[in-house]
Amino acid sequence: MEKEQELKNIVRERYAKIAEQGKAENASSCCGATTPSNKVYNIMMDDYSETNGYAEEADLGLGCGLPTQFAKIKKGDTVIDLGSGAGNDCFVARHETGAEGKVIGIDFTPIMIEKARINAEKLGYNNVEFRTGDIDDMPVSDNIADVIVSNCVLNLVPNKKKVISEMYRVLKPGGHFSVSDIVLVGELPDALREDAEMYAGCVAGAIQKKEYLQIMIDQGFQNLTIQKEKPIVIPEDILGKYLSPEEVKTFNKGETGIFSITVYAEKHGTPQEKEKINLSEIQAKQSCNPNSGCC
């Protein structure tokens, strides 16, 4: 428990600093947390600029996908965004829910909450609310959300089982989530995994893809589908902070992979509908299109 709190404090401190950085600086590093590469890279993020509801001043360049694009949000839905930052995904979700819906953003960094509220006020969105809190202990009642979205945040939470359990709790029966996140295939070098700065930068906090998906299955989610998957390539000048030149070459030639995935799953509608699914079934359900980056 003490270690979990220590890691949370690291992330909170780093993201408080990130809130004061520009989008270009954040986008050129690992989720904004590390010293930027001396070349211009968009290591993790996808381009939101053509997305309906996009608010440039709320885009800090911290995401690793476009979960709202896949979230099947309908007019009048109640949507929760986990790790809402300056509010960009909330505002995109609000475009889909319309004025008759409701969007709740949750973030544990006070300066992010402040920025998000200012942005919502500028946009005149009275149905977008931002709450300070941990996403593994959400300040939200049971069975309240139709949809949960999250963009490159769950990987930062030390206790992933707890946050996914919370997602199940706050979703209505029949509700669903679409989350983008960073996962691993194979083991990262110890230097990457152990460095606190890299932890806040999304990579060392990531877990194995199979483990990540299995936690969701174990919590009772159904119809689990990988909606999008793309490899993350870390530039050599960033890797060089943690690895020797020889280790960088070995790492780049190895079997280890860092991926951004967008995952969809549903909460069962009634107790009778609840059933476990096998991880092997997911590949057959994986949706893929020529623009998804997974083909």
Image: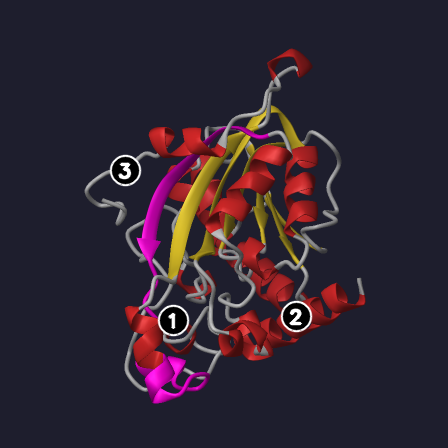
Marks 1 & 2, CB-CB < 8 Å contact: no
Among the two numbered marks 3 and 2 on one chain, the one whose residue lies closer to the N terminus: 2
Q: Compute the Cα span from label 3 to label 2.
A: 34 Å
Residue type at mark 3 is Cys
Q: Nearer the viewer, mark 3 or mark 2?
A: 3
Among the two numbered marks 3 and 1 on one chain, the one whose residue lies closer to the N terminus: 1
Q: Which residue is mark 1?
A: 27
Q: Compute the Cα span from label 3 to label 1.
A: 25 Å
| Residue beneath the point at 30% across and 72% down | 252
Q: Which secondary structure lies at badge 3? A: loop
Q: Which residue is mark 2?
A: 12
Query: Few, some or many C-alpha atoms within 10 Å of disc 1 (few <14, some 14-19, many ≥20)?
Result: many
Residue type at mark 2 is Arg
Q: Compute the Cα span from label 1 to label 2.
A: 18 Å
Q: Nearer the viewer, mark 3 or mark 1?
A: 3
Q: Quadrant of the C terminus?
A: top left
